[in-house]
Image: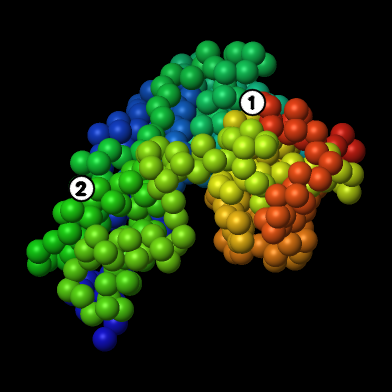
Amino acid sequence: MSYLEHFKLKEQPFRLTPDPAFVYWSKQHSRAKAYMESTIWLADGFVIITGEIGSGKTTLLQSFLEELDDSVVYAVVSQTQLTATEFLQASLTEFGFKPFDKRKVELLDMLNMFLIEQYANDKKVVLIVDEAQNLSLKVLEEIRMLSNIETHKEKVLRIILAGQPELREKLDSPKLKQLAQRVRLRFHLGALDKQDTRSYIDHRLKVAGATAGELIAADAIDVIYRYTGGIPRLINTLCDTALLCAFADNKPAVTVDDIMAAVGELDWDEHESNTGVYEQLQQIANRRPGTESHVMQIEVRTNGETESIQTFPPGRVIVGRSPDNEIYIKSKFVSRHHMQLVCDAERCFIEDLNSTNGVFIGEAQVKKRQLESGDVILLGVHELVYTNIGSGAEQAANTEVDFEDTHDDVPPVIHESSANRKQG
């Protein structure tokens, strides 16, 4: 008997691939969609939709596109680590052109003529840029210029930018003041609250064909919320794993025990938005040297040159380009919260936090795995060399580390080498 047959389901309720049929319209998702729909009848200005990783932006976009009628011509650009010319080529390609042998001035003329032609045919043109947080300031300025294309009556290109919270930070840059003034509507998708988490789970189960009783027990919702923080993608992962655990034990429904079994399988801690385990780990990780034996040493290299050597006690260490990380690497190759290391006295695990460019050990891209002492973690041009120093406090104490630099409130900054400007 299969997983679906056991629970009398027609399809998998918590798969991770975006599917508009499973969209749960919380108040904030409905509002974000209404903002996007407003671009169809209001042609001036940008609409900006931001949200945390896994908050449902891509599914929301797909649902919006699915409902557009034949009077709307649209293009979706999701590869955003591009130059201004490459961005124009990508946009025209999505509109059906083959623009790769054209100069920039020819690309602009091609796009301008296309927009005027569509306007003459009573067509509305929408350009949607997903993962827009990766766009350079120069490309964002180019997009602002595109929005100025107009007839004698109105603008002819409607633009929606969707991305992670870093997009909001970019739009607040003084260099983008003119673009920020053009933003007509801006909305941020947050996590679901506990009530919406329950409704979200019930909705997906119903769409998948669940008919009898509670397939996931009501008292399990608190636990699900505690470990997912209301992030839809994390809810899907945890619920799907819990269903598999219940299926393996031949249970008719998911209980709290199955949720905790799934948490163990996934090796998750409580979500950072909650208290409990996460706060305990943070307290451990933030202790000053000398208060507890250190178990992990990380050497950070850029283009083969050592930038810093840091040691950490048991707990969680976040690596990313945001200054609030324990290991702060200021580089375009590194996401805001790129990866985490979770260690105790004996073992250390690495986990990719849905980064843009991924985490590699050697040639292999890894999502989650246990580290061995000496492993070299690759993040673009940066290397993090992991050493297990948990066998004795003396070894950690004898390591030559400038703790004033590595454990201040603001972590040491690792800058991207000026010799490497192209994305690898």
Q: Give left or right: position of 170 versus 373.
A: left
Q: Is residue 358 above or below residue 334?
A: below
Quadrant that contains the N terminus: bottom left
Residue 81 position in % (x across, y down)? 68, 42
| Marks 2, 1: nearer the viewer | 1
Q: Residue at x 30, y 33 (%)?
A: 28
Tell me if mark 2 has few (under 14), some (14-19) or many (20+) residues whose alpha carbon lies within 10 angstroms of its own: some
Residue 57 in view: no
Toward which corner of the image does residue 110 lie, by quadrant?
top right
Residue 389 position in % (x across, y down)? 72, 55
- The amino acid pointed to by label 1 is Asp
Residue 323 in view: yes
Q: Is residue 323 above or below residue 204?
A: above
Of residues 130 and 249, the one nearer the viewer is 249
Residue 167 position in % (x across, y down)? 55, 30
Real-space Cα distance between discs 2 and 1? 40 Å
Say the numbered circle drawn on residue 205. none
Q: Is residue 315 above or below residue 170?
A: below
Q: Give left or right: position of 350 versus 158.
A: right
* SS under mark 2: helix
Question: Most extreme residue toward the bottom, as rendered?
Answer: 1
Residue annotated with mark 2? 199
Residue 391 position in % (x across, y down)? 69, 59
Say the numbered circle drawn on residue 409. 1
Tell me if mark 1 has few (under 14), some (14-19) or many (20+) residues whose alpha carbon lies within 10 angstroms of its own: few
- The amino acid pointed to by label 2 is Ser
Q: Residue at x 38, y 34 (%)?
A: 190
* SS under mark 1: loop
Of residues 316 and 165, the one nearer the viewer is 316
Q: Give left or right: position of 147 versus 59.
A: right
Question: Do the residues bearing badges 2 and 1 touch, measured as CB atoms within 8 Å?
Answer: no
